[in-house]
Image: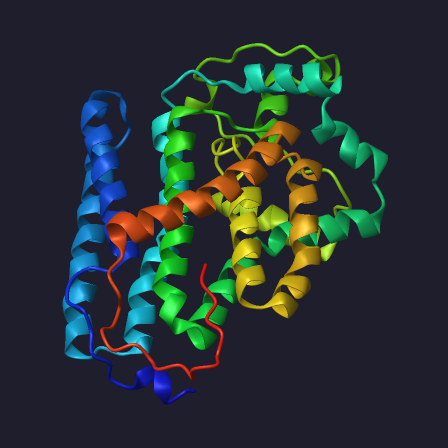
Amino acid sequence: MALDIFKRIETQKGLFAVEKISLLYNALTSILIICMFHMMEHPWQMLWDRALIAAMTFALMYLYRLAPSKFSAFVRIAVQMSLLAYWYPDTYEFNRLLPNMDHLFASLEQLIFNGQPAITFSELLPQKWVSEAVNMGYFAYYPMIFLVTIFYFLFRFELFEKVSFVLVASFFIYYLAYIFVPVAGPQFYFPAIGMENALAGKFFSIGDYFNYNVELLPGPGYADGLFYNLVESSQAVGERPTAAFPSSHVGISTILMIMAYRVNKKFFAILSPFYILLCCATVYIQAHYLIDSIAGFISGVGLYYLSTHLYKKWFISPMFKKREILPVKQKVTTI
């Protein structure tokens, strides 16, 4: 297995599907930067970053042709997936200029549930073991992405390009939604209006408040817990007042669970407890309104099928020409 990933393979020339969708998102947001140029804080830097990302993408494509193998294909795709860590906070640079919409979502939440589940959930279950369990689930988000993609790379390489495309394309669709639907979530909005107003069900517009303020108060739960502090540390580094609706944590993890189920039922069963805890954690730690998480689940299922359709119709470009021959009786799993 280890030697096999370095074995030279006959390849298709050109970009992988995941690179095509990345360049498309790059181009769309570059146009948006130009349209909003005089409003943005550092547009030249953002355009320069995009130029570097595009140049790196083409450089990796040409380097791959010198030594095409499963490993070098993995490197190309891993680079694009790692860049999601850049694209996520980048959405804040756009939506910070638009009027915040949290008051509408908090009001809808109050109307539907006669309260704020993001507040009552942690108040009803403040126990240490509950706090640590849900924070463990939330922290498992990125390990779940890593495990599912690695599983396909090692055991179903013929589906690896499709899996990576579905994930990255789904992320980009979420990111476009976050740009134009500026919702920060309870952990940012409630401190901005004051917890006394949130508890009283009084929600008001704060305009472009988050253009100048990024205050994030510590989440509820057992503050001395290991996973509590891991989540707090990760949020302190990369979290911005953006990306609340719909919840990509729920949406992407739902896509991961569909992928796991379709390739290996035991793998799906192992991931299931972490998935359930992650979905609960989005509301428990006040990262999302409950309606965000519900919308995340629904959109996750929809985006799985939409991204798969986009891949088959417009983006498919096999990473290598000569497919591995499977035994006649071996069942082929598709996603």
Task: Choose between 190 and 291: the one closer to the eye.
Answer: 291
Q: Tell me residue 292's x, y (percent).
A: 58, 31
Vertical placement of residue 192 versus 150, above or below: above
Query: Would you identify the image quadrant in which residue 79 lies?
Result: bottom left
Is residue 183 visible to the viewer in this orientation of the structure?
A: yes
The N terminus: image quadrant = bottom left
User: Which residue sits at x=55%, y=44%?
Assistant: 249
What kind of colouring is applied to the model shown?
Answer: rainbow
Q: Tell me residue 186's x, y (percent).
A: 62, 27
Q: Residue furthest bottom?
A: 3
Vertical placement of residue 245 versus 108, above or below: below
Task: Choose between 85 and 72: the one closer to the eye.
Answer: 72
Vertical placement of residue 290 versus 315, above or below: above
User: Which residue sits at x=45%, y=42%?
Assistant: 303
Query: Would you identify the image quadrant in which residue 102 lies?
Result: top right
Is residue 224 visible to the viewer in this orientation of the structure?
A: no
Q: Tell me residue 119's x, y (percent).
A: 74, 28
The C terminus: image quadrant = bottom left
Q: Residue furthest front?
A: 329
User: Which residue sits at x=76%, y=42%?
Assistant: 221
Q: Tell me residue 307's x, y (percent).
A: 38, 47
On the rendered structure, is 200 left or right of 264? right
